[in-house]
Amino acid sequence: MLIILLGPPGAGKGTQAEKITGEHNLANISTGDILRSAVKKNSALGRKAKQYMDQGQLVPDELVVEIVKERLRNSGEEDGYLFDGFPRTVEQAIFLEKALPELGKKIDRVISIDVEESELIERLTGRRVCSNCGANYHIKYNPPAVRNVCDKCGGDLYQRDDDTLETVKERLEVYRKQTEPLIEFYEKKDLLSSVDGSKSMEEVYEQINNILEDFQ
Ligand code: ADP
Ligand code: ADP
Ligand code: ZN
């Protein structure tokens, strides 16, 4: 099974990816997580990517495509892939389309998570992330039991550098211009399903699960 989660920053892709891959045997491929870990290690890739990420801009396609190639080469025993935050441009989508047949794979479904802009801003500016395991929280909608401590692993929670109001606004603009065209791209290929992302995390998960049932 190969599923893509598509949606603006803050739509809940990471939250849903965590739930889905917890219950289905799918590799969770988040280009944002891979890039943040490269930044943390201060690798050559991380240093290049950081300047774009801090500005709320997309990392250039060539770099992102290399990361995904590498990740697909190193895939393990999972039943398939769940992409979170990739592809994010039409160029990346075309790369994926060409790369998959060589791996004997094809896209089963692209799930677009729809949420309106004011809600996205509220979600992103209140987001907190575990510095140890990457789990997502929200100060209001999904707070940890103990303030700033991860429920799952006890790690410290932090606010991402790009979750400030100014950078969030830039990222939403970048999404509209560079990523939103993918909705039509996949609609034309009859691969798109949409879910109402404004609902609770559990309700969104249920909508996604209903779609996944067709591909087991
Ligand atoms: P994305 O990966 O699409 O950027 P996240 O999964 O990180 O989004 O979610 C962004 C923020 O919104 C997080 O703080 C998360 O806890 C919160 N969140 C996710 N889904 C919902 C939801 N359905 N309702 C309310 N808050 C949510
Ligand atoms: P969000 O939770 O806002 O959806 P991500 O964690 O997926 O954000 O990505 C954070 C940042 O990493 C993006 O703003 C962008 O700079 C970079 N990034 C992640 N995935 C991609 C991609 N597929 N193409 C280009 N840049 C990416
Ligand atoms: Zn944790």
Image (spheres, rainbow, N blue to C red):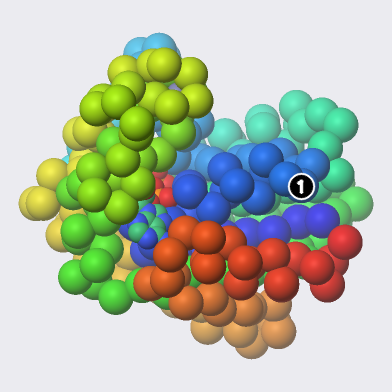
Q: What residue type is labelled 1?
A: His
**Which image quarter holds the N terminus?**
bottom right
| Between 186 and 155, the one nearer to me in the picture | 155
**Which image quarter holds the C terminus?**
bottom right
Q: In this view, does 54 lie above or below 133?
A: below
Q: Is 127 left, or right, of 29 in this rendering?
A: left
Does residue 97 appear in the picture of this structure?
no
Q: Is residue 191 above or below residue 120?
A: below
Q: In this view, does 128 lie above or below 104?
A: above
Extreme-front residue of the structure: 145
x, y (%) of residue 131? Answer: 37, 21
| Between 215 and 59, the one nearer to me in the picture | 215
Which residue is drawn at the image coordinates 18% and 49% (left, top)? 125
Q: Is residue 125 above or below residue 147?
A: below
Which residue is drawn at the image coordinates 43% and 65% (left, top)? 200
| Between 137 and 101, the one nearer to me in the picture | 137
x, y (%) of residue 53? Answer: 28, 39
Residue named by callout 1: 24
Does residue 164 appear in the picture of this structure?
yes
Across the whole image, how many numbered discs are drawn on residues?
Answer: 1
Q: What element carries label 1?
A: loop
| Between 90 and 211, the one nearer to me in the picture | 211
x, y (%) of residue 90? Answer: 51, 66
Which residue is drawn at the image coordinates 43% and 27% (left, top)? 151
x, y (%) of residue 34? Answer: 50, 31
